[in-house]
Image (cartoon, coloured by chain):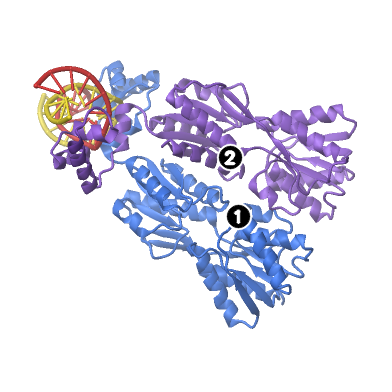
Chain colours: A purple, B blue, C yellow, D red
DNA sequence: TTGAAAGCGCTACCAA
DNA sequence: TTGGTAGCGCTTTCAA
């Protein structure tokens, strides 16, 4: 790798001058610039970002902390973030926390060590205290309003919509899966759901679930169908869980959606690939990622932020695990 | 952020000594070490990785280039890589190339600028020439043997297995989807498939497909069912495509697997969530990621590598879009 | 308009 | 066993 010194030498100028053309700063005469540019080309010189970062005390790197990229919700989020950051010349350093504090802390430290200019965290145990000493712009994603800067979608309303749509479509004995209690967004939507259900005239019951795992969800589904064989509507805590329930229901020969309606949450890509395709509450996942990146970039640039908490709207995606609404 | 200088001052020693305890190198007396460690704790000092990287001319960063993290094949790959790297204290800088040369080159440059110690590339246009001037350890993932170091699975054999299993299970008019021609691994498996099919006594036809997109695949499926209504076995180029075909088939009321058998490729997580669950050829995706990371780490450490090309075995996953094998 | 030089935080050599 | 110090590659004063 060529260095700035070599370029300077070849161009017959000082390193200061080379630096100036590199950064388009200060005065450089046209022909001097030309000489330098030629030398750069000749040597295939690429400025060393590390040296630059050391001096400037900031890099072009952004840290991204996710629970698990393997969970289909997160790749889309990550993609939104990346696409937005890339436009502005920032790059992603990324880690999966597995919801383990140790890993989370370890990654945060790594990010800091590497002079990241900002941080986006979508983990659930993202306790404020792990972050506040950082003196770095931080944006929390998919998490609630108690934090400084955050981007999330309207979980409560999403939960309400799910309940309303199911009622509107004629379910009368609804089963609600609560979702893991440590996953805040899941609890939000759950609250919204039971709020609406409580005000309605339908029967409903709540199943406490502890994970989003497909296999466990299948077991719960089995249990539900045994205990409440006449349940005619299920509100799942997310699309994976909904897939599992759908799977079990089909296996048991239930008619979907005539006998049983199922509604998911998230609208991950695969939900439309199921058969029947899954009706669900759509979070604008990709857009959430983009938005978070945008907020972070503004923060990095020290721009004014109109609102520190951005709540995006959710919507009902009417596919084939729900019936047509009654007029 | 505290610096080594401040630690040295507080501990009443020189920066050299602090550096020694930091790196466990050279001689440090027990009580001196203690003083230093206390100062470190007191100041919450974390060594600046950037400065270290500048001096050492290498970082703890590894670059990862993927086509698109949103494609369900890649998160698992990424996870395998990350888990393995993390054990050894390496971290991931990552980018999606979207199979665009410009983006690919841009990311490679960024990686180099940031002193990455190594590179893992899983892109399809990964032309050797874009990489060979890099003088960096590089491992190609999910790609063929023409490259220096690579980890991939046995695509040809996978293609063969798919054909054999379908024949064994009684399909007699098989349709093969060819998969995008620029995706080398897809072509490998296609070769394997037609090799076996050609030696057999079954009829078969090949459909040229140009993408892995679900929607396009649905359209092809429709076309297939129109043109070849008596096709009784489809070998898809991957699981997404297979999902689309399954979807269309179910929509048309075909009995799966009695009337039509479908076999996918990859065994991404969601394939088991489909109903009927998808029979497919399993690539050990996570393991491939791990293996690639392991090779890269060996390369970084300058260890001897027994084999530069690691080919992992694939296997048939017998689920519910294929029938039981005839005795 | 240019160059000399200090210094970002760290490591490693050499001398003490 | 310790400290002084040069230098990694760059940016940015300050002076010329």
Q: Nearer the viewer, residue B73 or B177?
A: B177
Asked whether residue A207 is in view, the answer is no
Is B129 displayed left or right of B327 in the figure? left
Classify the position of the C terminus of chain A by image quarter. top right
Tell me the tag on residue A286.
2
Query: Which residue corresponds to the image point at 73% horizontal and 37% vertical from the top-left?
Result: A209
Q: Nearer the viewer, residue A268 or B2?
A: A268
Is A49 displayed left or right of B85 in the figure? left
Q: Nearer the viewer, residue A13 or A229?
A: A13
Is B9 displayed left or right of A246 in the figure? left
Categorize mark 2 by other alpha carbons within 10 Å: few (<14), some (14-19), many (20+): some
Query: Which residue corresponds to the image point at 38% horizontal and 41% vertical from the top-left?
Result: B61
Work out how far the residue at label 1 is from the one at label 2, CA to CA, in angstroms: 21 Å
Asked whether residue B108 is in view, the answer is yes
Query: Which residue corresponds to the image point at 49% horizontal and 35% vertical from the top-left?
Result: A64
Q: Are marks 1 and 2 on the same chain?
A: no
Quarter of the figure with residue A30? top left
Q: Position of residue A250 (x, y in %)?
A: 80, 54
* Location of residue A276 with respect to A98 vertically, above or below: below
Tell me the tag on residue B268.
1
Classify the position of the N terminus of chain A by image quarter. top left
Q: In the current view of this chain or complex, which residue is farthest to the front?
A: A30
* Location of residue B182 with respect to A185 vertically, above or below: below
């Amino acid at each position: 790798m060529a260095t700035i010194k070599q370029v300077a030498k070849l161009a017959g100028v000082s390193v200061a001058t080379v630096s100036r053309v590199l950064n388009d700063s200060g005065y450089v005469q046209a022909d001097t610039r030309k000489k330098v540019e030629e030398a750069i080309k000749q040597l295939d010189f690429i400025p060393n970002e590390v040296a630059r970062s050391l001096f400037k005390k900031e890099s072009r790197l952004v840290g991204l902390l996710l629970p698990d990229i393997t969970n289909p919700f997160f790749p889309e989020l990550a993609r939104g973030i990346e696409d937005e950051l890339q436009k502005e010349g920032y790059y992603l350093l990324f880690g999966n926390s597995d919801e383990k504090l140790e890993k989370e802390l370890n990654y945060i430290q790594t990010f800091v060590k590497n002079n990241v200019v900002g941080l986006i965290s979508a983990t659930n145990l993202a306790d404020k205290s792990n972050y506040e000493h950082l003196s770095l712009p931080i944006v929390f994603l998919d998490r609630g309003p108690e934090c400084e800067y955050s981007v999330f979608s309207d979980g409560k309303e999403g939960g309400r919509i799910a309940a309303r749509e199911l009622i509107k479509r004629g379910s009368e004995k609804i089963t609600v899966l609560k979702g893991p209690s440590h996953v805040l967004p899941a609890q939000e939507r759950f609250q919204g759901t039971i709020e609406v259900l409580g005000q309605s005239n339908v029967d409903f019951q709540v199943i406490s679930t502890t994970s989003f795992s497909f296999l466990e969800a299948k077991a719960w589904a089995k249990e539900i169908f045994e205990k409440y064989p006449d349940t005619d509507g299920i509100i799942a805590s997310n699309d994976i869980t909904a897939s599992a329930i759908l799977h079990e229901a089909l296996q048991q020969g239930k008619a979907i959606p005539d006998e049983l309606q199922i509604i998911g949450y998230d609208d991950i890509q695969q939900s439309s690939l199921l058969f029947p395709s899954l009706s669900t509450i759509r979070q604008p996942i990709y857009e959430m990622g983009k938005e978070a990146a945008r907020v972070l970039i503004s923060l990095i640039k020290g721009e004014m932020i109109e609102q520190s908490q951005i709540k995006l709207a959710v919507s009902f995606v009417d596919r084939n695990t729900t019936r047509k609404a009654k007029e």
